[in-house]
Amino acid sequence: MNRFEITFTAIMATIIIHLTVAVIFVSVKISALKREIAAEIILSFDEEPADPDLEKAVELARSDLFAGASADELVNIIKNIADKPLDIDPEEYENMVKEEMIKSGLLNEKNFIDDRKMAEEEGAEEIPIPEEELTPQVTEKNEKPEEQGTFRGPTRIFYDLAGRHHIYLPIPIYKCEGAGQITLAIVVDRNGTVIKADPASRLSSTKDQCLIETAVEHAFKTRFNRDQSAPEKQGGFLTFVFVSQN
């Protein structure tokens, strides 16, 4: 065997050895990948999918906005209101909101919504609010008006935005002395930003300008989850129930 043949044989042997090592390495990787895929498939059958409504309800139940309401009650409100179509009659929607709030114990059965209907039937322009729903704000004699700050009232917030949930829902801080329900017709983009918020007078129980401005201001601060599959401009409702400051 001449020198050329020896060199050629050595090169071929080296190539064969490297190819053998590469084949073994790839085989080991494929085997490990199969085991990982099998483990993922097994886990996917064992794990129960999380209930987004329950998670949302637990989050809301921990908030001061829904003090006294259990997670189960909030789940019912979310399931019964949030995913319902928006192309319904405003009065029907109002009744739906009222019934769900009463069922959950968040409103008394005799509330100012009924009084608003009576006022409309009688042709009254102003909406009367029962005295028991209002607690006059009293200022201490030794407290100067300019020393009064803003207040974080016991406000309850509800929203109807099909298939979406809130990421940030600020508690209103305000100086308003009145009370009542302000419902806004909102438009939300795919990024979860509120791009429009207009008062829905037919669904509101008061025309208090201070409460309306507070509701609109905090509506624009609210953020919902991003959803690229949602409508480019998704319509919904955002309701604030303001309780008079003590």
Image (tube, rainbow, N blue to C red):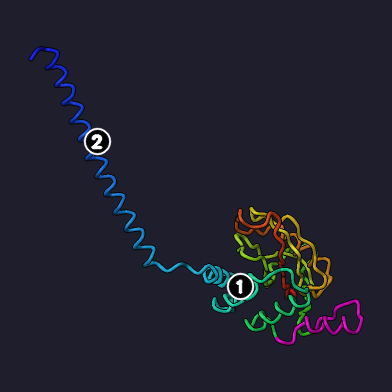
Structural crowding at the residue carrying mark 2, measured as other residues with C-alpha within 10 Å and reported as few (<14), some (14–19) or many (≥20): few
Q: Quadrant of residue 117?
A: bottom right
Q: Quadrant of residue 87?
A: bottom right
Q: In the rendered view, tell whether residue 142 sits above or below residue 166.
A: below
Q: In the rendered view, tell whether residue 13 sits above or below residue 171.
A: above
Q: Looking at this view, is 188 or 12 the one in front?
A: 12
Q: Measured from the top left, where is residue 213 in percent x and y?
A: 79, 62
Q: In the rendered view, tell whether residue 89 sits above or below residue 108.
A: above
- The residue that mark 1 highlights is 78
Structural crowding at the residue carrying mark 1, measured as other residues with C-alpha within 10 Å and reported as few (<14), some (14–19) or many (≥20): many
Relative placement, left or right, of 74 versus 187 is left
Q: Residue at x 47, y 67 (%)?
A: 50
Relative placement, left or right, of 207 versus 214 is right
Q: CA distance from mark 2 to mark 1?
A: 57 Å
Q: Secondary structure at mark 2?
A: helix
- The residue that mark 2 highlights is 22
Q: Secondary structure at mark 1?
A: helix
Q: Measured from the top left, where is residue 243 in percent x and y?
A: 73, 75
First reached walking from the N terminus: tag 2 or tag 1: 2
Query: Mark 2 or mark 1: which is in front?
Result: 2
Q: Residue at x 78, y 81 (%)?
A: 112
Which residues are the magenta region?
A: 109-130
Q: Residue at x 65, y 54 (%)?
A: 190
